[in-house]
Amino acid sequence: MYDRILISTDGSDLAKKGVDHGLALAKALGVDVIIVTVTERFPVFSSGAGYDLAWSDAALSEYAQGQKQAADGILLSAKQAADALGVTAATLHVPDAEVGEAIIAAAREGGCGLIVMASHGRRGLGRLMLGSKASEVLTHSNIPVLVVR
């Protein structure tokens, strides 16, 4: 049914539930996984006064290094969980990207038949204010998505 599963994680406790569920499913099906984490672009806010703050190369580099270190830790933890279950796992860090788009692209490029990710299941104003990466993936993906709560 699924030859490969993409598991998305941001390293949170909730995302760990998604990782654990995805790995258990992969083990039961005897398939490989790709574990992905996405780090977003450096946040730049417009002042509305006709000019924006110019960030130094050093500040941008420091941000990128911090994001990479965080992603490496997230992926290492998930890879160790896969190894403990005997699931073959590749890891992928997608830097400077829109999360939903990057997850879908990684699944497509990796030949995945299923995307597994966690969601808080927020509704209404909470979803509007905080956004929902799972909702974005569900809306735009033509690959089946399993959402873990």
Image (spheres, helix red, strand yellow):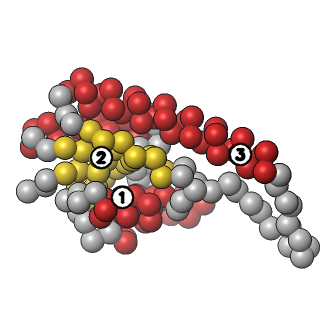
Q: Is residue 34 above or below residue 123?
A: above
Which residue is under mark 3?
A: 61
Q: CA distance from mark 2 to mark 1?
A: 9 Å
Q: Residue 44: x, y in percent? A: 74, 60
Quarter where residue 66 is shown: top right
Q: Secondary structure at mark 2?
A: strand
Q: Residue 70: x, y in percent? A: 55, 36
Q: Residue 24: x, y in percent? A: 19, 36
Q: Secondary structure at mark 1?
A: helix
Q: Secondary structure at mark 3?
A: helix
Label ID, residue 34: 2
- Let me know if residue 147 appears in the view: yes
Q: Residue at x 60, y 60 (%)?
A: 129
Q: Which quarter of the figure is the C terminus placed in? A: top left
The type of residue carrying mark 3 is Ser
Q: What is the residue that sits farthest to the top in this orientation?
A: 84
Q: What is the residue that sits farthest to the right in this orientation?
A: 49
Crowding around mark 2 (Cα neighbors within 10 Å: few <14, some 14 to 19, many 20+) is many
Drawn side of residue 102 relative to residue 34, left or right: right
Label ID, residue 106: 1
Closer mark to the observer between disc 2 and disc 3: 3
The type of residue carrying mark 1 is Ala
Q: CA distance from mark 3 to mark 1?
A: 24 Å
Crowding around mark 3 (Cα neighbors within 10 Å: few <14, some 14 to 19, many 20+) is few
